[in-house]
Image: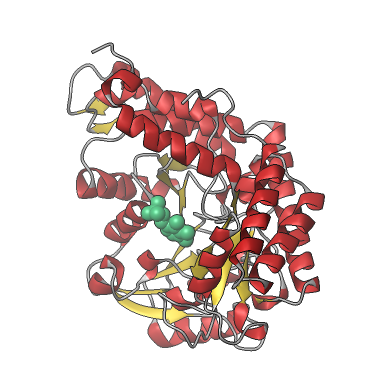
Amino acid sequence: MDKLLGEVDPQIVEIAAKDLKRQQDALMLIPSENYASRAVMEIQGSILANKYAEGYPGERYYNGCQFMDEVESVAIERAKALFGVEHVNVQPHAGSQANMAVYHALLEPGDTILAMSLSHGGHLTHGDKVNFSGRYYNVAAYGVDSETERIDMAAVSRLATEHRPKLIVVGATAYPRHFDFAAWREVADAVGAYLLADIAHIAGLIAGGVHPDPVPYCDVITTTTHKTLRGPRGAMIMCKSEYADQIDRAVFPGLQGGPFLHTIAARAVAFKEASQPDFKTYQAQVVKNAKALAARLIENGFRLVSGGTDNHLMLMDLTSKYEKLSGRQAADHLEDAGIIVNKNTIPFDKRKPRTTSGIRLGTPMITTRGMKEDEMVLVADFMTEALENRQKSAIKRQIREKVKTLCSQFPIYEYLNY
Ligand SMILES: *Cc1c(COP(=O)(O)O)cnc(C)c1O
């Protein structure tokens, strides 16, 4: 039982070592990812994973849970303080499960939700056809305006009046602009709907004070903990006290069994980190970097959806510069040059979701490494050079070397010895 991992399973160690090198040597621009801290990772791989603790602190279905109660209570109290909310459930295993639990708590199958369509930046769990949410609920979808490529609240209000949703979901996975939660509250009140904010992407920005706060306006808020919040993979649900019992019962026993206490402990560590002053500095830098990256890409001749960004991410429309290049091909060419992005549909995309006309970029990871505005100019120029020379493997290889040199000045996880 006490053998080292390297003795027990060199094969898996070797794979992890290869991915460490990948994470070190390339520019990670996927906006939903981040580098969790050593502290977060240490407790995640701990003995706290060994315990069953179905239920909630003080009311478990298993014995021996006193320290599980302690760790979950610490996580809850820290999350409440960090976001200024009345109630938190820290048990959802991931963002999708958190949204599922909210629907399970507040809706009956067949009820109507109004949420952002996947093709305009919404998440699968916002009612997409292939997802449980599209299968069990009646979905009305809003998108962005074709001119401004921003959400038009007057159009949302018209849709709400037409469809009378029981729940309105505000939030997205690929929307580069702020959400005006006060305006969403007005729409929800006008039709008597619950208002759910899904802040999976922007939770860190909100905790860091660089995005408008949903808490005063929303009945329920879901978030992942591993995106801009920079914690372990996982999620949580925040709500007003009046929904606390419904939400808790929907998570357990409604959808899940035993909570993952090791990741709940890691969430607690991440919430502590997020309450420190340097977290605010980090989030402000994430946004500054996104603006700098966007500005340079525009200077280099690319079109960004809605003309830029207010948050940590941007959507690049490739069609304006390269008619024939799809998002999928662009992402592969960039990977050849050591730049990792993901293909993404742009609003009103003429290509399919597997091909797309856009790519999605974000700054959370490169900012965690310590990069600032000057490096964003380099990153934008590397991307531009790689796409201009996409048919020339030798040039892409040269850029990959330059990327590697830049990355070597911003090392990650230096303590790891595999
Ligand atoms: C990432 C994301 C989720 C789901 O998160 P998973 O942890 O991958 O299930 C839900 N909603 C939004 C808006 C997201 O961006």
Horizontal side of 134 relative to 70 (left or right) equals: left
Q: Quadrant of residue 259?
A: top left
Location of residue 131 in the rendering, given as x and y in whole percent from the top left corner: 29, 68
Q: Taking the image as four quarters, which one is ligand 1 found in?
A: bottom left
Q: Toward the viewer: 136 or 58?
A: 136
Q: Look at the image and tell me in which quarter the N terminus lies.
A: top left
Q: Is residue 266 visible?
A: yes
Above or below, 208 against 136 in this view is above
Residue at x 76%, y 56% (from the top left corner): 378
Which of 229 and 16 lies nearest the eye of the viewer? 16
Expressed as whole percent of the image width and height from the top left, the position of residue 355 reads 44, 77
Instruction: List the single residue furthest toward the front.
Output: 394
Number of disc labels: 0
Position in image of residue 393 (x %, y %):
59, 65
Q: In this image, 91 relative to 32: left or right?
A: left
Query: 151 and 121: which one is in front?
Result: 121
